[in-house]
Image (tube, rainbow, N blue to C red):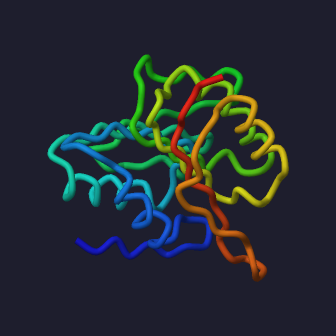
């Protein structure tokens, strides 16, 4: 199954394909922070690769909530007030909310992560606080990253948690 993501405000196909070799086992639990056009496509792609996929997505705007029946979508108002599932995840995709407020997730992610959790941060190079707050919450190995070399080019960092601080 080909992913065919558009990029832009959505993930690029390369970002998601680069994650796949790091995901182990037959089942996959995904937490996505920031829904959109790519949410359903990514979920369906994972369903073609894994025997069991649990996919939770959180979004601040009804406009971007996924209508894919395989995605549990939750609307929230602020990062502070958002209650994440009482579970640990294999993969966490951080792509919202828009702007620097996204850095507030990392403290909350400690409660839904474990050693071995993969965290993928879209637009990682946009704000220094993304790296600062990630470093305050986790020790990690960098698995993949892309810095921005041209305007509007995607930048991201993918890490594997080695210790929760």
Quadrant of image for the N terminus: bottom left
Task: Point out the residue furthest to the top here.
Answer: 86
Where does the image place residue 28, in percent across and percent down from the top left? 29, 41
For residue 102, which quarter of the picture? top right
83 or 31, which is in the foreground? 31
Quadrant of image for the C terminus: top right
Identify the residue shown where x is 67% and y is 45%. Answer: 97
138 or 17, which is in the foreground? 138
Question: Horizontal placement of 133 versus 53: left or right?
Answer: right
Q: Is residue 51 visible?
A: yes
Q: Is residue 57 above or below residue 82?
A: below
72 or 54, which is in the foreground? 54
Task: Point out the residue furthest to the bottom here.
Answer: 150
Total marks shown come to 0
Q: Is residue 87 above or below residue 124?
A: above
For residue 147, which quarter of the picture? bottom right
136 or 102, which is in the foreground? 136
For residue 140, which quarter of the picture? top right
Identify the residue shown where x is 70% and y is 56%. Answer: 124
Q: Is residue 63 visible?
A: no
Where does the image place residue 39, in percent across and percent down from the top left? 43, 54
Identify the residue shown where x is 43% and y is 42%. Answer: 91
Where does the image place residue 81, in percent across and percent down from the top left? 67, 20
Task: Point out the residue furthest to the right here.
Answer: 128
Identify the residue shown where x is 47% and y is 72%. Answer: 14
Where does the image place residue 163, in percent across and percent down from the top left? 57, 28
């Amino acid at each position: 199954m080909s992913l065919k993501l558009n990029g832009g405000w959505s993930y690029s196909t390369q970002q998601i394909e680069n994650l796949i070799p790091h995901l182990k086992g037959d089942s996959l639990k995904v937490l996505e922070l920031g829904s959109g056009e790519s949410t359903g496509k990514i979920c369906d792609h994972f369903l073609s690769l894994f025997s069991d996929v649990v996919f939770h997505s959180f979004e601040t705007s009804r406009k971007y909530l996924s209508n894919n029946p395989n995605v549990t979508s939750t609307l929230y108002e602020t990062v502070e007030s958002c209650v994440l599932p009482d579970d640990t995840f294999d993969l966490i995709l951080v792509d919202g909310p828009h702007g620097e407020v996204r850095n507030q997730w990392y403290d909350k992610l400690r409660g839904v992560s474990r050693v071995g959790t993969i965290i993928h941060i879209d637009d990682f190079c946009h704000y220094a606080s993304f790296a600062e707050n990630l470093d305050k919450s986790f020790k990690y190995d960098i698995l993949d990253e892309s810095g921005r070399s041209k305007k509007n080019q995607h930048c991201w960092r993918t890490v594997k948690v080695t210790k929760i601080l």
